[in-house]
Amino acid sequence: MDPRAGYTDLENDDIRRTREPMTMDKPVAAQDSPYETEVEEGKTYVWCACGRSATQPFCDGSHQGTGFSPVSYKAEKTATVFFCGCKKTGNQPLCDGSHSSK
């Protein structure tokens, strides 16, 4: 994991990172729709709650310094699930349709 993850550079947030912590009041919407994902029974998935991960919908450690923490999800069966992309769900980490409300 990049030890600089979760830090920003105002000039180019996507490429360079500094050691200035970025605290956040609200998560960043990674996309305005859910991530349709095949999950395997018994496997644990770690959902990105902050929206900054480059490996959406899963955590890559970019939440460090933001005040957000990822959410673990253990698949009860092999199936298709819909992980929240807007980060507004009341049913973390799964989509509850919140992206459709304005």
Image (tube, helix red, strand yellow):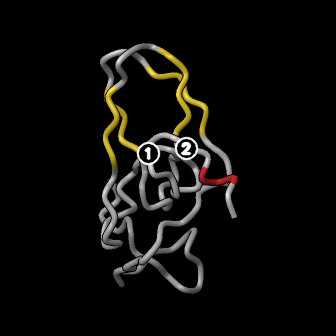
Q: Secondary structure at mark 2?
A: loop
| Image coordinates for residue 12, horizontal then vertical, percent | 59, 78
Q: Secondary structure at mark 1?
A: loop
| Image coordinates for residue 81, horizontal then vertical, percent | 53, 28
Amino acid tagged 1: Asn
What is the number of the mark on residue 91? 1
Residue that appears at 55% across and 22% down: 80
Residue that appears at 40% across and 14% down: 77
- Would you name the residue on which mark 2 appears? 96
- Eyeballing the image, is 53 above or below 75? below
12 sits to left or right of 44: right
| Image coordinates for residue 85, horizontal then vertical, percent | 58, 49
Q: How many labels, in total? A: 2
- Eyeballing the image, is 21 above or below 14? below
Which numbered disc, 1 or 2, marks the residue that appears first in the sequence? 1
Give me the C-alpha separation between circle 1 and circle 2: 6 Å
Contact between marks 1 and 2 (CB within 8 A): the answer is yes
Specify the quadrant of the image occupied by residue 20. Answer: bottom left
